[in-house]
Image (tube, grey):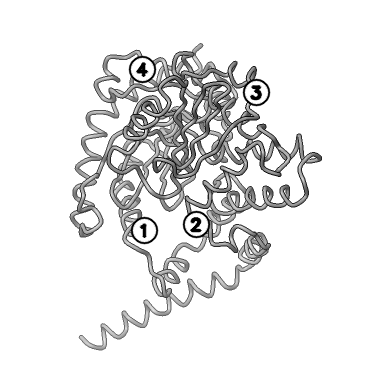
């Protein structure tokens, strides 16, 4: 018996050794990745990659028209023009795109952490207030958004207001009336401003903005060469890299463990229900219903990921909850996005699944959401309990909700026009 155990252990060691040698031998892509991320970055050196407060400070400086960045109020106008242009209903905001275009915002005041609000922008001349809640990794806690609304209404009863929920992926806030803004949109605005007004921006400010853009493309933005290269290397050498992570000084934390369990539980559902994986990260898993790809070129007209898909299911994994959402991403065909949105919100069956009020934006709109696991003890749950309870939630989704979603939307994804 002991000799058999020794033999099995020896075979396993040889297999693991082969994984590592394959990784080392095939090192060209690793060398390329190292070169791409070795360039010095000011914000990375400051340790602010995921520090919300420092991101808010930097964005606050860009919003301030009197700072010496040379942009005046252009960054503010660019961000809010994009946000308000994407609103499906004119009444969805107290301030319109025309307001941003016709008003002057040289008096804009920027406050940090006033009433615990990340960014508060006030234009007394225009009697307008803009509230921005910034989330890099943290999620909402308690009734903070409701509390912010009440405080702003009390302090600025006669001002028109816009409430913005800024996140890495543009996810929706828990309360209606908050506009979703993604860091991808922020970076896109900054890139456009550098292209259009770079000659007016002092060199020190321009370098700072370029470093900020590089930071996000390096660590957060998925549709980049770095992200694609990382995905390709991990897919090719997953076993070797997982083995390295397992034996590293900082092993996978609880959050990463839960994410791996999610991927494991999902696997048998994919082939059964004809779902295929799209681009995923450690905290997001994206999938598409393969028959919907039949709608060409509309379905694959997005800049969201390399696949070009417009509509995808997204599993969002945090320490405290696992959520499933159906998201309409960007598209070159706004009418196609609008048809999907209206087909969903105008259906009584759909409203029975997802009763929350939704407005169509120009970028990402979540038209369905379901908490698969949101228990307070999620961070202490053992793997067997986690997988069992997640499987129960997925069974409910695929037997109850999924047939309704599939049958309602599928007619929009055929080419029988």
> What secondary structure is marked by label 1?
helix
Q: CA distance from mark 4 to mark 2?
A: 38 Å
Query: What is the spatial separation of the Cα atoms under label 2 and label 3, in whole angstroms?
Result: 51 Å
Residue shown at 21% from the left, 47% from the top: 375
Location of the N terminus (image quadrant): bottom left
- Mark sitting on residue 256: 1
Residue 33 is situated, as x and y percent measured from the top left of the image, at 63, 61
Q: Position of residue 261 (x, y in %)?
A: 30, 54
Dividing the picture into quadrants, the one containing residue 73 is top right
Label 2 vs label 1: CA separation? Answer: 17 Å
- Count residues near mark 1 (Cα–Cα under 10 Å), then give few for <14, some for 14-19, many for 20+: some
Q: Reading the chain from its start, which is encountered first: label 3 or label 1?
A: 3
Question: Which of the labelled discs sits on residue 345, or is there none?
Answer: 4
Left or right of residue 367: residue 220 = right
Mark with earlier residue (2, 3): 3
For the point 39% across and 71% down, which residue is it?
A: 246
**Contact between labelled residues 1 and 3, with CB atoms less than 8 Å apart:** no
Q: Nearer the viewer, residue 388 or 56?
A: 56
Which structural element holds mark 2? helix
- Determine whether the residue tagged by mark 3 lies in a helix, strand or loop: loop
Tell me: residue 396, above or below residue 41. Answer: above
Q: Are marks 4 and 2 in contact (CB under 8 Å)?
A: no
Label 4: how many residues lie within 10 Å, few (<14), some (14-19) or many (20+)?
Answer: some
How many tags in the picture?
4
Decide which of tag 4 and tag 2 comes sooner along the chain: 2
Q: Are marks 4 and 1 in contact (CB under 8 Å)?
A: no
């Amino acid at each position: 018996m002991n000799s058999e155990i020794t033999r099995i252990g020896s075979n396993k060691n040889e297999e693991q050794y082969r994984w590592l040698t394959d990784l080392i031998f095939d090192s060209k892509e690793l060398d390329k990745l190292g070169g791409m991320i070795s360039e010095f970055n000011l914000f990375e050196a400051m340790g602010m990659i995921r520090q919300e407060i420092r991101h808010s400070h930097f964005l606050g400086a860009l919003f301030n028209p009197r700072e010496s960045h040379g942009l005046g109020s252009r960054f503010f106008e660019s961000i809010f023009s994009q946000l308000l242009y994407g609103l499906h209903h004119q009444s969805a905001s107290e301030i319109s795109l025309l307001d941003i275009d016709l008003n002057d915002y040289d008096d804009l005041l920027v406050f940090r952490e006033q009433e615990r609000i990340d960014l508060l922008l006030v234009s007394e001349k225009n009697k307008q207030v803009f509230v921005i809640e910034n989330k890099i990794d943290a999620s909402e806690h308690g009734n903070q958004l409701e509390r912010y609304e009440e405080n702003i209404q009390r302090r600025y009863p006669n001002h028109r207001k816009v409430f913005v929920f800024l996140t890495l992926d543009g996810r929706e806030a828990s309360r209606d009336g908050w506009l979703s803004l993604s860091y991808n949109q922020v970076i896109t605005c900054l890139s456009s401003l550098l292209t259009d007004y770079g000659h007016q921006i002092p060199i020190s400010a321009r370098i700072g903005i370029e470093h900020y853009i590089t930071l996000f493309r390096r660590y957060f933005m998925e549709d980049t060469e770095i992200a694609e290269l990382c995905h390709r290397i991990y897919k090719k050498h997953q076993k070797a890299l997982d083995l390295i992570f397992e034996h590293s000084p900082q092993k996978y934390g609880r959050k990463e463990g839960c994410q791996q369990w999610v991927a494991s539980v999902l696997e048998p559902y994919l082939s059964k229900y004809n779902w295929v994986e799209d681009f995923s990260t450690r905290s997001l898993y994206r999938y598409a219903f393969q028959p919907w790809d039949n709608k060409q070129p509309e379905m694959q007209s997005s800049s969201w990921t390399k696949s070009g898909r417009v509509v995808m299911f997204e599993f969002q994994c945090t320490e405290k909850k696992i959520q499933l959402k159906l998201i309409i991403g960007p598209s070159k065909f706004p009418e196609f996005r609008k048809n999907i949105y209206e087909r969903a919100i105008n259906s009584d069956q759909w409203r029975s699944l997802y009763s929350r009020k939704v407005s169509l934006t120009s970028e990402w709109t979540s038209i369905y959401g379901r908490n698969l696991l949101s228990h307070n003890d999620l961070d202490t749950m053992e793997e067997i309990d986690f997988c069992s309870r997640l499987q129960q939630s997925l069974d409910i989704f695929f037997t109850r909700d999924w047939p309704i979603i599939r049958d309602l939307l599928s007619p929009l994804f055929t080419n029988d026009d």
